[in-house]
Amino acid sequence: MTSAETRRALRADAPSGGMASVLKNGRFLALWLSQLATQVGGNMVLFALTILVYRLTFNPATGQGSSTSVSLLLLAFLVPAVIFSAVAGVYVDRIDRRLILIVTNVLRAAAFLGMFVVAEYLGGTERLVGIYLLTILVATLTTFFGPAEAAMIPIVVNRAELLSANGLFTFTLQASFALGFAVLGPLFVTLFDVDMVLFIVAGLYLVAGLLCWRLPAHHPRDEEHLMRGPIGKTERAVAGIFGQLREGLSYIRKDAGIFWALTYLAITASLIGVLGVLGPDFAIKALGLREQDFVVVVLPIGAGLVIGILALNVYGKFIPRRRVIEGGMLAMAAALAALSLAGPISGLLQRADRAITPIDLGPLVSLLAVVVVLALILGFAYAWVAVPAQTQLQEELPADVRGRVFGVLNMLVSVASFLPIVIVGPVADLIGTPAVIMGSAVFVALTGLASLLKAPSTGRAEVGPTLRQGPVDPVSVATSIGSSVDLSGAPDRPLTAE
């Protein structure tokens, strides 16, 4: 039976319906549980490694770790996506996707076990270098895993279930960031420390690899077996990569809507990365907490993100998508600016409380309370930018090239998003974290104003039948934060840390 016949048979056998129905599909359930394990585990690792790198570079004389070193960690997650995304999109179309999913999960589990050994038995600079190198390996494997995962969805579900399946994957991607990075990561680091988190996550990836055994094999088309010699492989790889790069650039030049969608995605991805770099220092210096306690900022962002997505489902269909995005951009800018001034704002509110109100509102106007509220607003605004922008990008690209073009577009988004991360660490070490956050707010505000003046109008902003484009959160920009996604039939994503 050919791969096309296999796909048709699987679709014919699968039940139609909503979310409950699609979860009764055993093969899809295995794929979704694999995604859940890798996304949650990847975000846990991102949090744990951020804390580990900050601790390894902590200087008692200055009372802080190196934000520059944390920037390098995030770059280790992101750079492979820039280099390998286009290549991954090509090879995912040529190799059995089930095999790719199994092998990349097992190899990433081995890499996390390697990190456990490095963190446990090496010291000083050797430990830091080992962490960076293994992180690069994990991120490289993720650029191949992401597209294969997304491309497997239309193979294991029928067309009637595709929207429900994509919606579940999108929600899982976003929720896994909140669960892994903001809840389980901090909890496990506090209870077991970083080393044990790496060991636990390695187990999650092994489980994901076992789950992928249940998926159907999906071999390339017969013509893709031709010219398998070294020369043929080289010619096709080189021609395919550069051809797809030209195709992606051509789409961007010709379609202003795609250009602006990429701009929005790059900004949201880079902002999460920037906050990840600055988080430990912000927790220590601005909030007087431990470095791992910057979860008090991350968790409300995750909660705001979920609330924002739910609000989009209800109200997005009544508002033009472009206005939703631009409103979200300006709200993000305002929240960031206020976050950089959280200390003075809290002090002002406390003085007003003492002077005006007859009751003590101290806990409600404390610095911690102000930061939590601003982070909640930031997460809500983030959802109103990232989700409509992803939907626009996925809707406007032709389905027959979506997977490969997403590989190129993901590379371009990664390039645009990691540049700020390169800069903010060293700059924060020089001028301080609040000043960098304020600078980010100004940049986001200017981009939002430029969009108001120049961006083309788009459709409504409901979350709707969205597919899923990679990484919008740190690991999605990192782990996956590094792969591209096409949930409708072409290669995949993403990240999401994995």
Image (cartoon, rainbow, N blue to C red):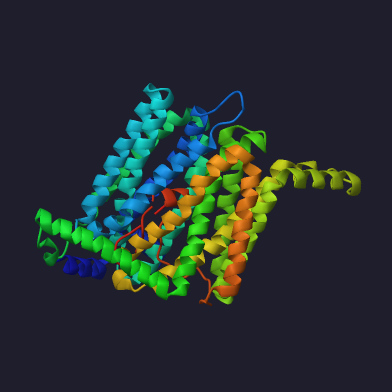
Q: Position of residue 159 (x, y in %)?
A: 31, 71
Please name the residue shown 62% across and 28% down the image.
Answer: 63
Is residue 227 left or right of 397 when viewed as pictured?
A: left
- Tell me if 189 is positioned left or right of 17 in this view: right
Residue drawn 24% across the image and 67% down it? 13
How many numbered marks are there?
Answer: 0
Q: Quick check: 240 left or right of 61?
A: left
Does 466 sit above or below residue 318? above
In this rendering, does residue 366 appear at all? yes
Q: Nearer the viewer, residue 404 or 11?
A: 404
Q: Residue at x 46, y 64 (%)?
A: 262
Q: Is residue 426 toward the left or the right of residue 219 in the image?
A: right
Q: Along the line of sight, which residue is nearer the eye, 306 or 380?
A: 380
Whether 417 is drawn above or below 404: the answer is above
**Viewer-nearest residue: 323 or 194:** 323
Q: Residue sitting at 42 percent across and 30 percent down? A: 128
Where residue 349 appears, as percent x and y from the top left, is: 81, 47
